[in-house]
Amino acid sequence: MEGLLTFLGTGTSMGVPTLGCSCAVCTSTDPHDRRLRPSVLLRWHEAGRERVVVIDTGPDFREQALRTGLSRVDAVFYTHGHADHILGMDDLRPLSFVAAREGGQIPLYATEETAGTLRKVFDYTFSPEATYPTRARVRIEPLEEKTTVHSVEFLRIPVLHGKMGIVGFRFGRTAYLTDVSTIPETSFALMEGLDCVILSALRHKPHPSHATLDQAVEWARRIGARQTWFTHIAHELGHAETNRTLPDGMALAYDGLWFPVVL
Ligand SMILES: [Zn+2]
Ligand SMILES: [Zn+2]
Ligand SMILES: [Zn+2]
């Protein structure tokens, strides 16, 4: 089956431009240097209708949904509970009302730890005592090793984000790993035979919980996908100048980039 993958955002937690910064990338006029918080959208057709999955709903989710003309969502997968990945959850509300009219809720697939964060941050949505009448029609679902959404299987790929265990996802011949600092051996084994891999690559300077670009390039070589895209990019990396330095088949992604994927 063929689907389409769209980058809703490719920036690091602070976004690019970064508030209060006047560096060359933050003041660049190249639209590729404007990065909203990281998220991807996956669309495909099943049983005659479009299916839509979003990975992470960061603080820019509303703007991203408007930009891509998103009118419904079938499911959301969460990588982890940091603000740049979950704080747009409440902006699912209007789309969840669409789901409710179709007779359901939007499932949010999350690890136990991420589910705990979602319940705490959005207690007015998830608390059993929640009485807020227009709360999102969503439900948290445990993230199993494999989750099938409308005929597409999402395989959970455990990785480390500093000391925190988080997850990436494989769907068909594509994998999405963001906020990664270590990929366990067992997770490399889950990424054999990929056409496309998306890896986070923050900047050149080391960071305790994010890979540098060089580290991500090294992983990309080992994974050996035909195409590697880097995301979760900080303002230290200018789009055009950085891409000139990368090997063939590897490049920084940018907001709005989309391409077909085999699911
Ligand atoms: Zn992040
Ligand atoms: Zn800057
Ligand atoms: Zn994070």
Image: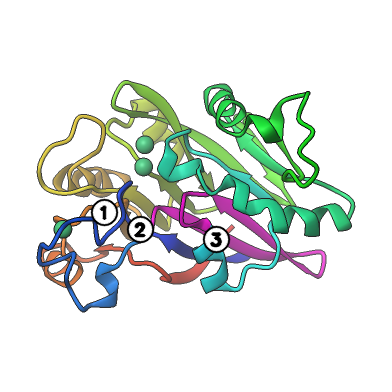
Give, as a three-letter code, the residue at label 3.
Answer: Arg
Image height of 2 relative to 179, above or below? below
Query: Residue 124 is drawn in which quadrant?
Result: top right
**Which element is circle 2 on?**
loop
For residue 48, side relative to residue 53 (left or right)? right
**Quadrant of the displayed image that contains ligand 1:** top left
* Number of residues whose C-alpha sits closer than 10 Å to that of mark 2, classed few (under 14), some (14–19) or many (20 or more): many
For residue 176, the mark is none
Image height of 237 relative to 131, above or below? below
Q: Are marks 1 and 3 in contact (CB under 8 Å)?
A: no
Residue pointed to by mark 3: 62
**Which element is circle 3 on?**
helix
Residue pointed to by mark 1: 233
The number of numbered discs placed on residues in the rendered structure image is 3
Of the 4 image quadrants, the one containing the C terminus is bottom right
- Does residue 202 belong to the magenta stretch? no
Give, as a three-letter code, the residue at label 2.
Answer: Thr
* Mark 2 to mark 3 CA distance (whole Å): 15 Å
Compare marks 1 and 2 and give the one earlier in the sequence.
Answer: 2
* Number of residues whose C-alpha sits closer than 10 Å to that of mark 3, classed few (under 14), some (14–19) or many (20 or more): some
On whether ligand 1 comes within 8 Å of the CB at mark 2, the answer is no
Question: In this view, which residue lies farthest toward the front?
Answer: 132
Compare marks 1 and 3 and give the one earlier in the sequence.
Answer: 3
* Mark 1 to mark 3 CA distance (whole Å): 20 Å
User: Which label sits in the foreground, 1 or 3?
Assistant: 3
Residue pointed to by mark 2: 10
**Which element is circle 1 on?**
loop
Q: Are marks 1 and 2 in contact (CB under 8 Å)?
A: yes
